[in-house]
Amino acid sequence: MHLAVPLVAGALLFGLGIYGVLARKNAVLVLMAVELMLNAVNLNLIAFGAYLRDRFRTGEVTTLFVVTIAAAEVGVGLAIVLLLYRRRESVDLDRATELREEAA
Amino acid sequence: MTTFDVVIALLAATSVGAAALVVTTRQVVHAALWLVVSLAALAGCYVVLAAELVAWVQVLVYVGAVVVLMLFAVMLTRAPIGRSADTDGARLGAAVVATAMTATLVVLLLKSFGDVRVDLKARPVGNGEVIGSALFRSWVLPFELLSLLLLAALVGAVVLTRDDIEGEQ
Amino acid sequence: MSSAAWLLPAIPFAAALLGALPACRTRPRAAAIALTGATTTALVALLLLPSALDDPTRVRLDRLLIAPAGALQVLAGTRFDSLAAVVAVMVGVVALAVQVYSVGYLHDDLRYPSYAAQVSLFTSAMLLVVVASDLLELLVGWEVMGLCSYLLIGHYRELDYARRAAVKAFLVTRIGDVGMLLGVAVLGTAAGTTDIGELLAAVPRLPHGALVAGSLLLLLGVAGKSAQFPLHVWLPDAMAGPTPISALIHAATMVAAGVYLVARLHPLFLASTVTLDVLALMAAVTMLLGALAAFAQDDLKRLLAWSTTSQLAYMLGALAAGGYDAGLLHLMVHASAKALLFLAAGLVLHAVHTGALSQMRGVARRMPVAALALIVGGLTLAGLPPFAGAWSKDSVLAAMKSAAGGSGPGPDQFEGVLLYLAGLATVLITAAYVARLLLILLAPPAPRGDLHEPRLSMAQSVTALTVTCGVSTFLALPDALPSWLPAPAGAREGIELSVGGVTLTAIGVLAVFAALWLYSHAGARDPVLLLGSSQRRLRSGFGVDALYDRGAVRPTRSVAAAVAETDASAINHAVEGIGRSAVRTSSSLRVVGAGRVRSYLAALIAGVLLVVVSVAVVV
């Protein structure tokens, strides 16, 4: 099997995830795009694991870890989104501009 | 060109196509459903790549739990069912950056691994027994640490979402 | 003994430094330091005099290389000969008299300590000019004198006109100093040395152009320092300073420096007929202008100031006519007379608290010390025998007459004749203003009311100077001086004195005295009324000041105003515009920091990509 096939697929997924993170305003949609990026990484890990064939099955184990961490991330992320919604009745990220410099 | 190539290419194409819809559709609920398709296709890829356990975990955790969480969030934030106009911000800049990133990654990967072949039958399939023994022999410590991380995330999520917890003041 | 010449500038300099210390800024300490310094200086000058006069042709040199400036070897050191010795005595004695006098005159002045230190510095600078062996060294003293005159003329800095006078004196002499500096540069370049002795030795070898240009430029400096037309305008205004300072400037230091420089470099000037012509014309114009203006003054000190201008022109005229000894003799005699007159005038001013002559009618009748001093000084100034002024003035006139006759060194005959005629006329006008001064101050009846008693130190120094001035009569007697001051090669040797000349001068002076006495006695009138409507014009010195005001001061001011305006409008606005545009640019860039996390993230990713790609390309 060509290793390039999963690798290119992973790259495309990663790019799409970036696009989603940058283009979307809805916080839930941004979280979905983040999941896409994580999965792109997972695909790479599995593909390289199959290629390297190491005794510790590093690729697969690490993928499991990433999945775990992603689950935690989604949990905390969605909690933040809900908090945001409760505070402002909106999940529009463009309106969460507290980092803006105060007008002089 | 082997059967593996064909199968994995089809699955990857499905996944990428569904992902493209995830990040472009105007309907929030549709995005979540397309995410299911994309992640499920990825699980198929894992099966082809002989990572059986990971494929199951992918289906259970992602397709099952995470997407359900997403749908809950969609509902709790009262996202409109159907098209909504305010899903996207500045798309051009995002498209440029994303394209540049993708192009860079593709070029780098193809230059480095463009002609590498993988023999998928050369080692045991990564089923529960194989991965489980690797996990609990070689990876015990990170595994235990991850349980702590999950606990922390759990507590954090609870603290964040509940507003009836008194602070120290 | 000769190596002690460096003490002459060093002692007053040390006194000035000590006087500037904060610990010495109390009145008694400042007075003690200043008086000790001045006394020691005068003593050293007197002690050095005999050995210098023993062998008048000998020049004692002590030199030290301080700066090898390329081809020019700048040597600092002392050049002490009979000329330097005599002038040093003059400076030392007058400075001592002034310091003693000042203790009384500035009794109630809070700034006396700094004043005393400045006078010491002034004396030091003048003595440096006197003993300098190198033109650049001389220039240092020359410039420090300019600074001191600025500080001392502006001593009453609360008074607007005093500040103006100080600035005017500084700027006008500065014009001359620029010429002086350029002249030194021209001569130094042409001769390859700025050492006075070597420069004078090199005079015959110098190219004619460099000689003329250099001496004319030096002459500009002389005109500035010695208040000669057209740079004489600062001297009358300099009367804004304290009266002892006027005495110091007029007798010993500032204005004497110009004459001294011409005497010091006399062979250089004699070698250039063009320069002598200019000098002769300058002296002729200045002596007439100064004498006429002096006659028309309403203010005692301004009268004396214009008189100084006129008398300095005598000295320079004598030097222009080649009369080396005559010019220096007159310098000496005038120094003692003018110092005496100024200090006596200070007594009068101190008594009546005004400088206006109209307020002083008969004042001197109540002040015997001042009256005696004024008579001795005034008659010396007028040149009436047996006072020393008669001999010096007659020798000056004799030198001018020979120049007018076209014999010996000197300017062309035309300028010589002009100079001689101006000199003769000035004798009479001098007699007239001296007569006017004495007639006003001594006219009966003596005024009633309180007169401010002079303080002891003032009376002492005036008395001492009166005696000195009287004694100088004998020192200046014919045949006494020539053996003191051997004239440099080419100059007229000795004093030419004729009994007939002295008699004629005396008769003329007496005639003027008598005429004015009759005029004023007849109706208690001020002789100045004789001038009628032309008094105003004469009093202002023929309007030279107004001319400069229109021609130089106002255009300069308007240019300055235009520059200030340009600075405020164009340059300032440009600077502010840069600031404002920076603010505008940054506030437009502020859009980037609008708080949208997504755009931050996009920039972050783009940056990471840029790094990765560039690393990949390089590797």
Image (cartoon, helix red, strand yellow):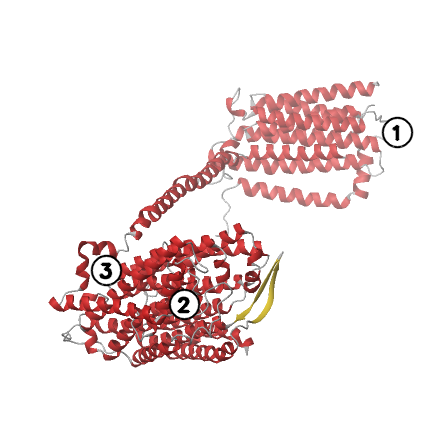
Could you tell whether C545 is left or right of B132 in the image? Answer: left
Q: Position of residue C95 (x, y in %)?
A: 40, 73
Give the image location of residue B50, x and y in percent.
Answer: 81, 28
Seen in the image, is C428 located left or right of residue A17?
left
Placement of C64 over or under A41, stated as above or below: below
What amino acid is found at the position of numbered circle 1 in the picture?
A: Ala
Mark 3 is surrounded, within 10 Å at the Cα level, by few (under 14), some (14 to 19) or many (20 or more) other residues, namely: many
The residue located at (50%, 54%) in the rendering is: C214
SS of the residue under disc 1: loop
In the rendered image, residue C55, in percent from the top left (x then y), is placed at 53, 76
In three-dimensional space, the C-alpha distance between marks 3 and 2, rounded to whole angstroms, equals 28 Å
Near mark 1 (Cα within 10 A), the count class, few <14, some 14-19 or many ≥20, is: few
Residue C234 in the image: state x and y as whole percent. 34, 58
Instruction: Quickly name the residue at label 3.
Output: C296
Which numbered circle lies on residue C326?
Answer: 2
Task: Return the residue at label 1.
Answer: B122
In the rendered image, which quarter contains the N terminus of chain B?
Answer: top right
**Tag of residue C98:** none
Q: Nearer the viewer, residue C81 or C105?
A: C81
Residue B126 visible in rendering: no
Pair 1/2: label in front: 2
Q: Chain of mark 3?
A: C
